Image (spheres, helix red, strand yellow):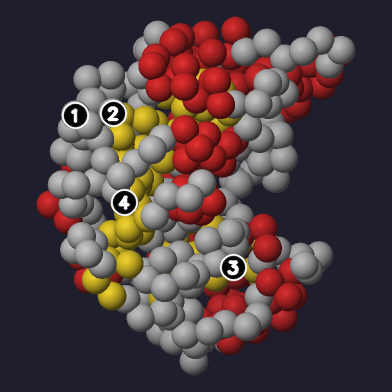
Amino acid sequence: MGNDAMTDPDGPAPEDRDDRSGARVTPDVDLRHHGDAEIGPGLVDLAVNVRLAEPPSWLVHRLATSLRDLAAYPDTTRARAAIAARHRRPVADVLPTAGAAEAFVLLARTLTPRHAVVVHPQFTEPEAALRAAGHPVDRVLLDERDGFALDPARIPESADLVVLGNPTNPTSVLHPATTIAALARPGRILVVDEAFADTVPGEPESVADRRDLPGLVVVRSLTKTWALAGLRIGYVLASPDLVRILTDAQPLWSVSTPALIAAEACCTPEALAQAEALAVTLAADRSYLVERLRTVPGMRLPVVPRSSFVLARTEGGPEIRKQLRERGYAVRRADTFPGLGPDWLRIAVRDRATTLAFAAALEGVVR
């Protein structure tokens, strides 16, 4: 399906209702719609959250060198050791995956939850994977009026699988680590999607290093910061028992040799220092984007964003997206995230020159 077909039609936001648990649930939305469906030839991409146009030169060199080893089957040993050292965890806690998406599929196929709860708005692939594996899913919808903040009391005690993002896509909310920790308990699997954790300087609310929280599973991605979406590399951090179960379910050699080389390279002290510098630059670029958006009449920002994207609301969202495309800009529709409607837009943070030009285009279409 082409890009134009993916953008229409834009229907009204579905009406929310309460489910049996007290969680909130919405009728079906397109859980498999992602930002890459919004982009097209000649459009400035503000829809996809990959932060660089291409990997840095040192990483390209490592990847190119790895091509000499393609005759051999992939070996995860060095990548697992590098990831484990980066998070100060045993190697047995680490499973490299073909992006975060494979991690969610493996979890859905191996876990047998009696009551799965996904906290929304958030990245939709975890719920899509759970439903594809035959698991019913309840949704807890966070509210704009609360700044999309998470209250642990809203998670049903009966939930034995809870999934949430931190920082959360698309809201750009960073939940406190204490709030995340309050959700963990014996008999519950707590899956925290930290695909964007390294967009926050210092990763202050990450729980990736925590081994004391029962049932904690952290999913990370290397594709966003290092421009590796086409390579597919992420990893799971969990207890050794769960890692063994996931490993048994994972297809043999699903993570390629170049992807494993990338994982190892991106966990070095030098790479981590560069990621931190990128996060600091991102914070400044994001502040500039927020400043510009707040000068546009009719644009509302419900929270102070903390990641590499900004969630905004304006009347006539579908028409605004259409007119922005006509002016050469692609932004992410947000009504495919449960809990949001057609007037919501997700805008990726870019450099200041791009932001300035985009803001001028936006001012020409927002009335």
- Can you identify the residue that label 4 sits on? 117
In this view, the residue in front, 31 or 230, is 31
- Amino acid type, residue under disc 1 in the picture: Pro
- Amino acid type, residue under disc 2 in the picture: Gly
Residue at the farthest left position: 153
Quarter holding the N terminus?
Answer: bottom right
The answer to whether residue 214 shows anywhere in this view is: yes
- In contact (CB < 8 Å): disc 1 and disc 4: no
Instruction: Estimate the x, y position of residue 266 in percent, counting from the top left.
Output: 58, 22
- Tag 1, which secondary structure? loop
Q: Residues within 10 Å of mark 4 (few under 14, many from 20)?
A: many
- In contact (CB < 8 Å): disc 1 and disc 2: yes
In this view, the residue in front, 310 or 161, is 161
Dot 1 or dot 2, earlier in sequence: 1
The answer to whether residue 195 shows anywhere in this view is: no
- Can you identify the residue that label 1 sits on? 186
- Tag 2, which secondary structure? loop
- Can you identify the residue that label 2 sits on? 215
Dot 3 or dot 1, earlier in sequence: 1
- Pair 3/2: label in front: 2
- Pair 3/1: label in front: 1
- Amino acid type, residue under disc 3 in the picture: Val
In this view, the residue in front, 329 or 259, is 259
Residue, x 48% and y 50% (percent of image)?
134
Instruction: Give the number of the disc on residue 331.
Output: 3
- Asked if 342 appears above or below 192 in the picture, the reply is below
- Amino acid type, residue under disc 4 in the picture: Val
Dot 3 or dot 4, earlier in sequence: 4
